Amino acid sequence: MSQSRKDTKIYVEIVNELRLMIERKNLKPGDKLPSERELSERLNVGRSSVREALRALELLGLIETRRGEGTYIRDYGGHKLVQLLSTFILQDENAKRDIIETKYLIELDCLWLNLQKCSDGQLQDFKSWAEEAQYTDDEFFLKVVRLTENHLFLRMWIILKDYYNSLHLDQMVTSKEDYVQLADMLITRDESKVRNAYKLLRKLSKN
Amino acid sequence: MSQSRKDTKIYVEIVNELRLMIERKNLKPGDKLPSERELSERLNVGRSSVREALRALELLGLIETRRGEGTYIRDYGGHKLVQLLSTFILQDENAKRDIIETKYLIELDCLWLNLQKCSDGQLQDFKSWAEEAQYTDDEFFLKVVRLTENHLFLRMWIILKDYYNSLHLDQMVTSKEDYVQLADMLITRDESKVRNAYKLLRKLSKN
DNA sequence: AAGAAACGACTGGTCTGACCACTGTGACAG
DNA sequence: CTGTCACAGTGGTCAGACCAGTCGTTTCTT
């Protein structure tokens, strides 16, 4: 009727089956999945079909397999996906511009979110860290994004960061004062000041 | 030499092999890839390994296979990825809040981008359309996002929209005037006015 | 008894060959 | 010329075999 046709490939069904299993058993990153042979038996499919499904999920970075041990759920992060998709997607020049543009805007969004939602204490801690610690640009903004406690932005930013770094742009040198300044402006809770501090840090001339 | 190292799985090497092949021959969406059997022969690997690689690429939406015909390069788009990643990523409770928050912020980003980059003519056209056409909320903002010509934002927004709709929130009724008003504010190129118009439309009390 | 070596059970990694279902094509009968 | 049909090629799936690691237990050595 609807789509009970067998036009859906087995391996896709297995992927869905796995999703359900993970949901039902509430499996989290680090947990172990059944072995390939067991899955093949439980689902009444060939082991090769199970493998196709698992390999696909692995390439996506959703699971991890260790020979001799088993298959485990993984904490998702860009990984190979980036490298992969980049050759397929980032062909034209516009893509390059999109990545830069998007990364910057998301960083701004996260700054804004922090400005809205963080407590004074959190912002103060952040500033102290910015003053005292050693960090790269990625590390600094990772902390910014983490502070929002928005996993979606975190995922997106991590992927964007990987793309961004794969562009091999000229590394611009950002002085530590710029970072500290930005952290400082957060405390003022003044949106436009934060915005300007970010622009300065990124050396964006105008808006 | 290069691949005599057994630390990389065959199917990953095949994926890379395919990437190279696509680059070298400059294959584009719609073009045909060699058959599974031919690949298996040319690369001296088993057909099952070739399949694992192809299935992974298929799940990613990078290729398309048609039984009896062959394997073709596909025009990339989110596809199954969304559905897939959602269950693996959005497990916790905060996910819901993240989706809403992120969608709104990205919509604001796109509005801001349009305000920066669009010509007067484009904005005028957009306003005319907003006044005269019939559209849903999704359709309205799809147009907004499209206008930015940032494919990355477009992809992200589409994904977010799907997530968002799957939440089955109470449909809020937005009057057409709000949309027109927003389009109108774009023309003024006043950032804060656009921001306020958006907040009004989304019925967000404060910031 | 304590430590080391060997074994066995289990897991993923890969290959081969077989069969099915489907699509495109070309030969042949009308 | 046209319609039919068989065939070769392609993806979809499966079963079985073997390799190569990991881990826990057993057995042997000291």
Image (spheres, coloured by chain):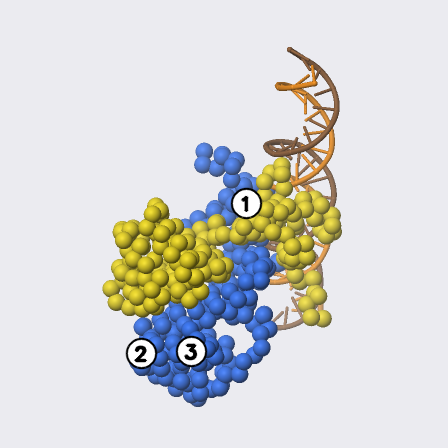
Chain colours: A yellow, B blue, C orange, D brown
The chain to which mark 2 is attached is B
The chain to which mark 3 is attached is B
The image's mark for residue B198 is: 3
Spot occupied by residue B49 in the image (x, y as percentages of width and height): 58, 45
The crowding category of the residue bearing disc 3, from other C-alpha atoms within 10 Å (few below 14, some 14 to 19, many at least 20), is many
A160 above or below A195?
above
- At 36% across and 66% down in the image, what residue appears? A189
First of labels 3, 1 by sequence position? 1
In this figure, which residue is indicated by the disc labeled 2? B189
In this figure, which residue is indicated by the disc labeled 1? B11
Spot occupied by residue D7 in the image (x, y as percentages of width and height): 66, 54
Confirm or deny contact between disc 3 and disc 1 (CB under 8 A). Answer: no
- At 48% across and 59% down in the image, what residue appears? A149
Near-viewer residue (C12 or A73): A73
First of labels 2, 1 by sequence position? 1
A20 above or below A80?
below
Tell whether A96 sits left or right of B46: left
- At 57% across and 46% down in the image, what residue appears? A64
Q: CA distance from mark 3 to mark 2?
A: 14 Å
Near-viewer residue (B173 or A58): B173
Amino acid, disc 2:
Arg
Tell whether A61 sits left or right of A137: right
Near-viewer residue (A32 or A55): A32
First of labels 3, 2 by sequence position? 2
The chain to which mark 1 is attached is B
